[in-house]
Image (tube, rainbow, N blue to C red):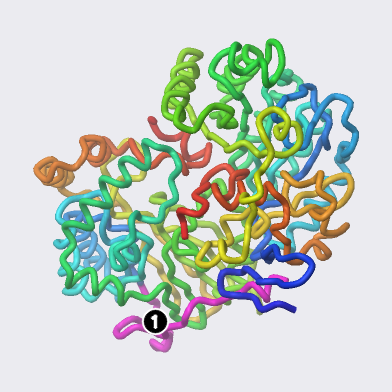
């Protein structure tokens, strides 16, 4: 076995020169609750979700319930629900109610499907729980002109309507935008987002900007990774490995447990069928690992310092 | 798998002065101050209050400087009162001359104010006290009446980990208590005080996690009060331990005047005067964020 350094990173030789990261602790358990099935077909989706992409299927309420029970012994700190579009799952409200009895939860949604029959019980569950329920709404432009070519016709307005409904139900959604603009426009775009959200009644809006992941459809929309964009052992010297999601998380899918929600299309990221099997080091061999290294913990609600933290 | 990850912090043993257990079965009171953030006026008031309430030992869980004026005024108060101090992320940054406070903000506005605060604090902390900050332990362990108490800044595993009440599951806290072999874990860092009983440990020992709050700025509750905690420990393990949160009213208008005279941002002054947080909001979970004004 390779030696483990104090940073939790292992150096390797041979077949795979990619450094490996061990699971420091299972802080976050993710559920790919609707698999790769989504009501939208965004042009930048890194796992190419779509209404007809059944590569990964829905998890059932019983499955989620069983994983929640198993997760207790691992001391999981918080839970995340993603897809696909989680609000396509008719049992999402019950899943969230049961999750919120154990710990905090976050749902990643495109905000276009928030029927009252789902939102009302979800809001009730959130109010009853001592834990926070975070709702992250993905929007990728500050207007229909910039958002809809990526996310689909009419999605900007529908997502803004969704944000308004969430505010009305007592939530403070985190609006999450993928950087599909030039980095130098960050501040301008951020200001535009804040203004648009304040226009619809969101005082002091919460906004998270994510880097784009150059895999899946995004590799064709913009560009893929170039040869220099990969993680090497040298790049992890002095780097806080807990910045990487695979050091603190695992993802439950219909096809097993994966290292990271970004990499479920990569066979090498499947770690096993159980949490015990998935408690093993992850090779940072995928190209998207470079983005995670660069920006750090990009999928969690807070943080994302990346290499600056070292 | 959990045991493997239990990289326990260095056990520095009991510091000089504090209770270590055998006190004839008499109850023990321990005062716990969270981040001081250069609020020397609140610290002086809290020390006096804690002594008046019969505290037998005083601890500070770190972040001595930040946010407030005249950082050097805090250190003599701590030393003269015999307060034992744990190193916070701010203390670590100042001691090592790092570029920022290690709070990990990504929001540009939060980062702007965090930078202003950090640069001011660094520039106004004398070399002597920077060195002193560098000597502080990352955590402390006490044993009182058979209870194992762990004092840390953010969490036992990471100095800058935020443990918010609404974003931290009980099962995670129980894991921390198991992994770090502690019956009572006490932290600060977030700025908001809270406590939670944990499932009993080996032998049925009662367990607890508490965030002791901070003296440096109000608790985002619309009042200028700040908070510390008093741990009441019976002399024997079978008695119930209790942690009481104590509000501190101090001359906050004088502090605001000092902050303005030092040119600190008006947003910081507003927090001291109104009790509402105006900056460093990005890391607040939904529940805690919704209780504030901003």
Q: In front here: A6 or B255?
A: A6
Quadrant (top left/top right/bottom left/bottom right) for the N terminus of chain B: bottom right
Residue B247, compared with residue B257, is above or below; it is: below
Q: With respect to residue A261, does A207 lie above or below? A: above
Q: Taking A281 as reference, is B281 left or right? A: left
Residue B115: x and y in percent read: 30, 47
Q: How dense is the environment of label 1, judged by Cα within 10 Å: few (below 14), some, or many (20 and up)?
A: few
The x, y position of residue B131, in whole percent, is 24, 73
Q: What residue is shown at x 70% (from left), y 63% (from top)?
A: A18
Is B17 included in the stretch rendered in magenta?
yes
* Viewer-closest of B27 and B246: B246
Image quadrant holding the C terminus of chain B, namely: top left
Q: Give the chain of mark 1.
A: B
Region of the chain picked out in magenta, as a range: B1-29
Q: Label 1's element?
A: loop
Q: Is residue A214 visible?
A: yes
Farthest left residue in view: B261
* Residue depicted at x 28% and y 52%: B118
Left or right relative to A94: residue A300: left
- Up-down: is A239 above or below B107? below
Residue at which label 1 appears = B26
**On the picture, is B46 further left or further right than B192?**
left
Q: Main secondary structure of the magenta part?
A: loop
Q: Give the residue drawn at x 79%, y 22%.
A: A39
Task: State the count of labels.
Answer: 1
- Note whether residue A130 is visible: no
Identify the residue at horizontal 57%, vertical 65% (top origin): A234
Which x, y percent locates residue A253?
Answer: 83, 46
- Most extreme residue toward the front is A227
Look at the picture and state if B159 lies above or below A137. Answer: below
Residue B270 lies in quadrant: top left
């Amino acid at each position: 076995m390779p030696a483990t350094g104090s940073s939790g990173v292992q150096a390797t030789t041979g077949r795979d020169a990619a450094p490996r990261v061990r699971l420091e602790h299972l802080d976050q358990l993710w559920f790919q609750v609707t698999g790769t099935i989504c009501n939208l077909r965004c042009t930048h989706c890194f796992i190419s979700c779509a209404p007809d992409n059944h590569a990964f299927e829905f998890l059932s309420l019983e499955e989620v319930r069983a994983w929640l029970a198993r997760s207790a012994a691992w001391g999981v700190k918080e839970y995340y629900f993603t897809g696909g579009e989680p609000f396509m799952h008719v049992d999402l409200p019950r899943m969230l109610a049961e999750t919120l009895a154990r710990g905090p939860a976050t749902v990643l949604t495109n905000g276009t499907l928030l029927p009252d029959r789902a939102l009302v019980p979800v809001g009730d569950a959130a109010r009853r729980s001592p834990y926070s329920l975070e709702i992250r709404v993905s929007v990728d432009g500050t207007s229909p002109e910039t958002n809809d070519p990526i996310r689909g016709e009419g999605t900007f307005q529908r997502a803004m309507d969704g944000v308004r409904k969430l505010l009305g139900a007592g939530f403070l959604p985190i609006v999450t935008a993928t950087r599909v603009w030039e980095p130098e426009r960050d501040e301008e775009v951020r200001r535009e987002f804040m203004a648009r959200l304040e226009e619809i009644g969101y005082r002091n809006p919460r906004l998270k900007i994510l880097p784009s992941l150059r895999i899946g459809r995004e590799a064709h929309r913009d560009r893929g990774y170039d040869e220099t964009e990969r993680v090497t052992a040298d790049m992890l010297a002095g780097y806080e490995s807990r910045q990487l999601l695979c050091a603190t998380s695992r993802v439950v899918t219909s096809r097993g447990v994966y290292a990271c929600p970004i990499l479920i299309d990569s066979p090498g990221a499947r770690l096993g069928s159980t949490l015990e099997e998935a408690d093993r080091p992850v090779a940072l061999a995928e190209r998207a690992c470079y983005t995670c290294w660069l920006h750090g913990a990009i999928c969690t609600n807070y943080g994302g310092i990346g290499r600056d933290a070292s | 798998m959990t045991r493997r990850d239990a990289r326990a912090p260095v056990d520095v043993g009991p510091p000089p002065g504090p209770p270590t257990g055998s006190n004839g079965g008499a109850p023990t009171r321990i005062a716990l101050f969270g981040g001081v953030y250069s609020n020397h006026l609140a610290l002086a008031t809290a020390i006096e209050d804690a002594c008046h309430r019969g505290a037998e030992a005083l601890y500070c869980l770190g972040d001595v400087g930040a946010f407030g004026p005249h950082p050097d005024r805090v250190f003599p108060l701590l030393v003269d009162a015999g307060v034992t101090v744990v190193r916070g992320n701010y203390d670590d940054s100042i001691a090592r001359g790092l570029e920022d406070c290690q709070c990990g903000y990504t929001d540009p506005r939060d980062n702007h104010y965090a930078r202003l605060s950090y640069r001011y604090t660094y520039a106004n902390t004398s070399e002597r006290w920077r060195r002193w900050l560098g000597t502080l332990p990352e955590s402390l362990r006490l044993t009182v009446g058979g209870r194992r108490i762990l004092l840390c800044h953010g969490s036992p595993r990471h100095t800058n980990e935020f443990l918010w009440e609404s974003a931290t599951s009980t099962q995670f806290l129980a894991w921390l208590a198991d992994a770090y072999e502690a019956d009572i874990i006490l932290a600060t860092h977030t700025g908001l005080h809270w406590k939670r009983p944990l499932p009993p440990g080996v032998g049925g020992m009662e367990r607890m996690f508490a965030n002791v709050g901070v003296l440096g700025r109000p608790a985002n509750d619309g009042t200028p009060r700040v908070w510390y905690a008093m741990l009441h420990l019976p002399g024997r393990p079978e008695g119930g331990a209790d942690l009481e949160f104590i509000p501190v009213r101090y001359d906050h208008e004088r502090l605001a005047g000092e902050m303005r005279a030092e040119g600190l941002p008006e947003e910081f002054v507003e927090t001291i005067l109104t009790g509402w947080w105006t900056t460093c909001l990005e890391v607040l979970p939904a529940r805690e964020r919704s209780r504030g004004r901003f």
